[in-house]
Amino acid sequence: MSPTPLFHVALLEPKIPPNTGNIGRLVCALGGRLHLVGPLGFSTDERACRRAGLDYWAHLDWRQHEDLAAFEADLPQPTRIFAFSTRAEQSYTQPTYQAGDCFLFGDELHGLPPQVLLRYEGLRIPLRSPHVRSLNLANATAIATSELVRQLGHPGALGPKPSPLWHAEVGKSEGSTPGPTPHAEGHS
C-alpha cells in the first residue's frame, strides 16, 4: 500500500458489490486509495472478499468511514474533492488535476444527494444519448481516474508485460521482427 496515493476515490454508500470490486481493482492498479463512506450494501470481511474472488483486495489501499465528516478528516489537507453527478455543469475534462485529488461518487441508485453536491466542485461525464440516464458506477470511475492519471503523465506506471503469444511466435522464426507479415505487392 502506498503511503502517498496518487489520487483518492470515495464511494458514498455503495450498494452493489461487483461495482465496488471493479473500482477497487482499478484504484489498486492505478495507485490510488479507495474510501468507502457510510453504510455499505455488502460485507468487506476477508471471507466475503475471498468468496467474491477479490484476490487483489489485500493489496488495495482502502479505508472505511462512518460518514462524510470522518472521510474528510482522514484526507490529507489540502485535498480537492470533485463530486461526480449527471446534474453537474462542468465536464470532468475541464479541471487540471493534481496528485492527491479526490473523486466522490454516490450510490448506484440515487447518486449524490443535493446537499453533498453543494459542498464540492461538481463534475459530470457528458453523455450523447438521451436514452441513457447515467453510466455504471465502475465505468464512470474508470473514465474519471484515467483522465487524472493521463493528465499527470502516468507516474510510476509499469512497462508493458511480455506476451506469451509474442514470445512463442518470435521463437518460431529466429531473427524475424514481430508484427504484421508483409504481403507481396498486388496480393492481399
Image (cartoon, rainbow, N blue to C red):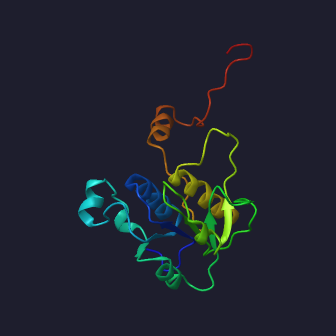
Could you tell whether 51 is left or right of 3 in the image? left
What residue do we see at 68% from left, 62% from top?
123
Could you tell whether 162 is left or right of 97 in the image? left
The answer to whether residue 163 shows anywhere in this view is: yes
Q: Quadrant location of the N terminus?
A: bottom left
What residue do we see at 49% from left, 48% from top?
162
Q: Which residue reaches farthest left?
A: 47
- How many numbered marks does the figure carry? 0
Position above or below: 157 against 19: below
In front of the other: 136 or 109: 109
Q: Quadrant location of the C terminus?
A: top right
Position above or below: 82 against 166: below
Could you tell whether 85 is left or right of 62 in the image? right
Q: Position of residue 7 (x, y in %)?
A: 57, 71
Position above or below: 149 against 69: above
Could you tell whether 96 is left or right of 33 in the image? right
In front of the other: 3 or 132: 132
What residue do we see at 51% from left, 32% from top?
173
In front of the other: 32 or 39: 39
Q: Position of residue 11 (x, y in %)?
A: 49, 65
What residue do we see at 62% from left, 68% from top?
117
Q: Position of residue 54 (x, y in %)?
A: 34, 57
Position above or below: 95 against 25: below
Q: Position of residue 62 (x, y in %)?
A: 42, 71
The answer to whether residue 153 shows anywhere in this view is: no
Q: Quarter of the image holding residue 89?
A: bottom right
